[in-house]
């Protein structure tokens, strides 16, 4: 297994956007559909005075989010790892379902690991406190550091499970741990840079929208607030907001999701040219 270029991985989303602009357009279309779905959900299902309705809305919202991420994760992996199979990477099938299941499994693994570490740290604190208050305080501080470190290390070490699952056409939630061994710091660097780039893209996109709305005599905060009446979503400025936000989400998604596929490809050049 060879090394990889963190810089190449961090800029993979920009390469995809440059070489496949229609993929970004298609992903923006998917984002727009799910934004409308979220609007419908908030408008018709959420009732602050009804616990049952709120719970139903929560479950529906989580399901919509899982489907959304499953589709776009698979699309990102497809354009990077199987570039000749699709122009925009969008499909709806077993690959997307595997990504949804992988999200659930990975989230459960991180949650269980976090609970386990939190329990052991709490137990160490409780046992040490009667013996030494200062040492117990040190253990408490270390517990906080370890807990936050775990929430960084685990997702990074498991981040190659998505592209690995996509390439092998079967769930591979644990293989990423072995593959990422010895590559944590370059992977962290690639993901940090990609996150910063995505944040800049979001800020620039929202600034452009804010400028458009200011020119129209309105504010992005007011237009962006979810209307209580669904018909208000059909107003021109609201449509502009939803379309603009969809493109921002699509570009940011390319920047965030593509690096893992790039790293996987670089570490497996024999299997994925």
Image (cartoon, rainbow, N blue to C red):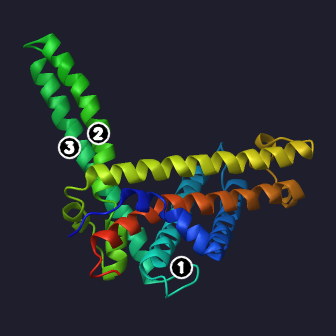
Q: From the viewer's perspective, is the residue at label 2 or at label 3 nearer?
A: 2
Give the number of the mark in front: 1 or 3.
Answer: 1
Q: Earlier in the sequence, mark 2 or mark 3?
A: 3
Instruction: Let me know if residue 63 appears in the view.
Output: no
Is residue 115 toward the left or the right of residue 159 in the image? Answer: left
Give residue 124's position: percent from left, percent from top.
13, 28
User: In the rendered structure, which disc, 1 or 3, sits on the residue that comes first in sequence?
Assistant: 1
Q: Which residue is mark 2?
A: 149
The earlier-in-sequence mark between 1 and 2 is 1
Which residue sits at x=39%, y=75%? 98
- What residue is shown with label 1? 89
Residue extending farthest to the bottom is 85
User: In the shown orientation, is residue 47 left or right of residue 14?
Assistant: right
Rendered position, 63 above or below 58:
below
Residue 254, position as x, y percentages in the image = 54, 64
- Residue annotated with mark 3: 116
Mark 1, Cα crowd under 10 Å, few <14 / some 14-19 / many 20+, is: many
Q: Residues under labels 1 and 2: Cα distance?
A: 34 Å
């Amino acid at each position: 297994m060879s090394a990889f270029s963190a810089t190449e991985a961090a800029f993979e989303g920009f390469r995809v956007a440059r070489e496949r602009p229609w993929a970004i357009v298609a992903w923006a279309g998917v984002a727009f559909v799910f934004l409308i779905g979220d609007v419908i959900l908030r408008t018709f299902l959420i009732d602050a005075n009804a616990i049952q309705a709120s719970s139903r809305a929560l479950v529906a919202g989580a399901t919509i989010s899982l489907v959304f991420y499953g589709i776009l994760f698979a699309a990102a992996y497809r354009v990077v790892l199987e570039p000749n199979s699709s122009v925009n990477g969008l499909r709806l099938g077993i690959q997307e379902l595997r990504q949804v299941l992988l999200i659930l499994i990975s989230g459960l693994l991180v949650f269980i690991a976090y609970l386990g570490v939190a329990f052991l740290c709490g137990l160490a604190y409780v046992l040490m406190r009667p013996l030494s208050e200062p040492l117990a305080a040190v253990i408490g501080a270390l517990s906080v550091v370890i807990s936050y470190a775990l929430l960084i290390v685990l997702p990074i070490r498991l981040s190659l499970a998505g592209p690995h699952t996509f390439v092998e056409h079967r769930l591979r939630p644990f293989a990423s741990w072995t593959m990422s061994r010895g590559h944590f710091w370059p992977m962290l660097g690639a993901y940090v840079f990609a996150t910063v780039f995505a944040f800049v893209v979001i800020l620039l996109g929202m600034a452009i929208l804010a400028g458009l709305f200011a020119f129209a005599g309105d504010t992005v905060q007011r237009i962006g607030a979810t209307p209580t009446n669904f018909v208000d979503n059909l107003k021109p400025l609201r449509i502009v907001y939803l379309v603009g936000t969809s493109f921002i989400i699509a570009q940011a998604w390319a920047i965030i999701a593509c690096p893992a596929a790039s790293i996987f490809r670089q570490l497996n050049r024999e299997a994925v040219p």
